[in-house]
Image (spheres, rainbow, N blue to C red):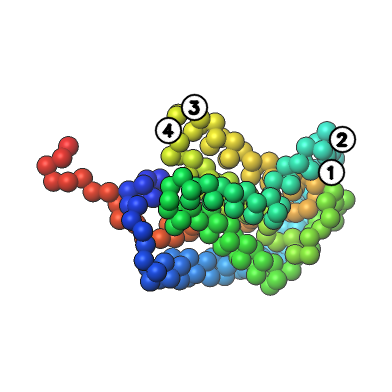
C-alpha cells in the first residue's frame, strides 16, 4: 500500500548529499535490478516461450478484425497520449506548476523521475531483446525501437499514475475523484490503442504496464522522508 501522505508529512528541503545518495540507492539500484527482470522476461518470450507468440498473433489478428473508421480515429488520438513528445510536454508543465505551487522541487520531480526510469529501462531492454512487431497491418509508423516492452504503455502508466497519486492532495472531493479517474483511464486507452493499431503483442504491453507501475513506485519513494509522528499525549 502506497503512503499517499509521505510528501506532505515531511516538507523539509533535502541536502545535496541526501539527493545524490537517494538517487543512487533508491533509484539507480532498484532500476538496474528491474531492468534485469525485464530483459529476462523478454529473453524468455523470445526463447523458451517463443511458441506463445502464435497465440499472441491470434489476439493481434482479432483486433484487426474489430477495426472501424471511428475506432481508427479514436485510437490515433489515444495513442498520441503516450508519445514521447506528449509525455515529456505534460510532465514538464505539471512538474513546473507543482513546483510553483508547493515550492518543493523534490516533490515536483516525482513524475519526471518515474518517466525517466521507465524510459531508461525500456530503451536498454529493447536494445537487448530486439523483438519484432506483430505481423499484422500496423496503423502507426513503427518507432526505431523493438516491440518489447511497449514504450507507450510504460510511459503513459509512469506519468499518469504518478499524477493520479499527486492528485490526492486536491481538497474538493468531487474534483479529486474526477481528476483521478481521468488520469487512470488515460493510460488504459493508450494500452488499448497500441494493441488495436497492431503495434504490440499483448506481452509487450503487459510488461510495459508493469514497467510503468514499478517506476511509479520507485519515483514515489525516491527520496527518504520522515513520517509524521503524533506527539506524546496527543489523541
Give neighbour class at mark 2: few <14, some 14-19, many 20+ (Cα, 10 Å).
few
- Spatial CA distance of label 3 from label 4 is 9 Å
Residue 43 in sight in this render: no
Q: Answer with mark 1 or mark 4, whichever residue precedes in sequence.
A: 1
- Spatial CA distance of label 1 from label 4 is 44 Å
State the SS at label 2: helix
Give neighbour class at mark 3: few <14, some 14-19, many 20+ (Cα, 10 Å).
few
Frontmost residue, 58 versus 198? 198
Q: Is residue 66 above or below residue 22?
A: above
Numbered disc in front, either 3 or 4 = 4
**Residue 124 horizontal side relative to residue 145, left or right:** left
* Residue 26 x, y percent position in the rendering: 43, 65
Q: Answer with mark 1 or mark 2, whichever residue precedes in sequence.
A: 1
The quadrant where residue 224 appears: bottom left
Frontmost residue, 33 versus 109? 109
Give neighbour class at mark 1: few <14, some 14-19, many 20+ (Cα, 10 Å).
some
**Residue depicted at x 78% and y 60%:** 143
**Residue 192 horizontal side relative to residue 210, left or right:** right
Query: Disc 1 vs disc 4: Cβ atoms closer than 8 Å?
Result: no
- Spatial CA distance of label 2 from label 3 is 35 Å
* Residue 91 x, y percent position in the rendering: 59, 51
**Residue depicted at x 70% and y 54%:** 85
- Spatial CA distance of label 1 from label 2 is 12 Å
Which residue is denoted by mark 3 in the rendering? 174
Amino acid at each position: 500500500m502506497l503512503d499517499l501522505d509521505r510528501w506532505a508529512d515531511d516538507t523539509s528541503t533535502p541536502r545535496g548529499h541526501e539527493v545524490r545518495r537517494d538517487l543512487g540507492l533508491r533509484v539507480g539500484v532498484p532500476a538496474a535490478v528491474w531492468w534485469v527482470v525485464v530483459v529476462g522476461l523478454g529473453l524468455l518470450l523470445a526463447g523458451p516461450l517463443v511458441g506463445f507468440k502464435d497465440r499472441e498473433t491470434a489476439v493481434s489478428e482479432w483486433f484487426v478484425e474489430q477495426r472501424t473508421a471511428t475506432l481508427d480515429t479514436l485510437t490515433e488520438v489515444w495513442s498520441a497520449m503516450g508519445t514521447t513528445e506528449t509525455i515529456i510536454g505534460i510532465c514538464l508543465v505539471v512538474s513546473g506548476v507543482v513546483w510553483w505551487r508547493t515550492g518543493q522541487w523534490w516533490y515536483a520531480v516525482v513524475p519526471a523521475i518515474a518517466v525517466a526510469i521507465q524510459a531508461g529501462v525500456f530503451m536498454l531492454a529493447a536494445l537487448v531483446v530486439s523483438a519484432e512487431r506483430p505481423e499484422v497491418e500496423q496503423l502507426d509508423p513503427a518507432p526505431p525501437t523493438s516491440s518489447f516492452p511497449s514504450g507507450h504503455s510504460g510511459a503513459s502508466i509512469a506519468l499518469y499514475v504518478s499524477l493520479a497519486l499527486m492528485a490526492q492532495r486536491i481538497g474538493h472531493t468531487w474534483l479529486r475523484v474526477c481528476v483521478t479517474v481521468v488520469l487512470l483511464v488515460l493510460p488504459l486507452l493508450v494500452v488499448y490503442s497500441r494493441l488495436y493499431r497492431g503495434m504490440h503483442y499483448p506481452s509487450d504491453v503487459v510488461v510495459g504496464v508493469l514497467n510503468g507501475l514499478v517506476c511509479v513506485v520507485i519515483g514515489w519513494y525516491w527520496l527518504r522522508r520522515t513520517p509524521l509522528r503524533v506527539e506524546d499525549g496527543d489523541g
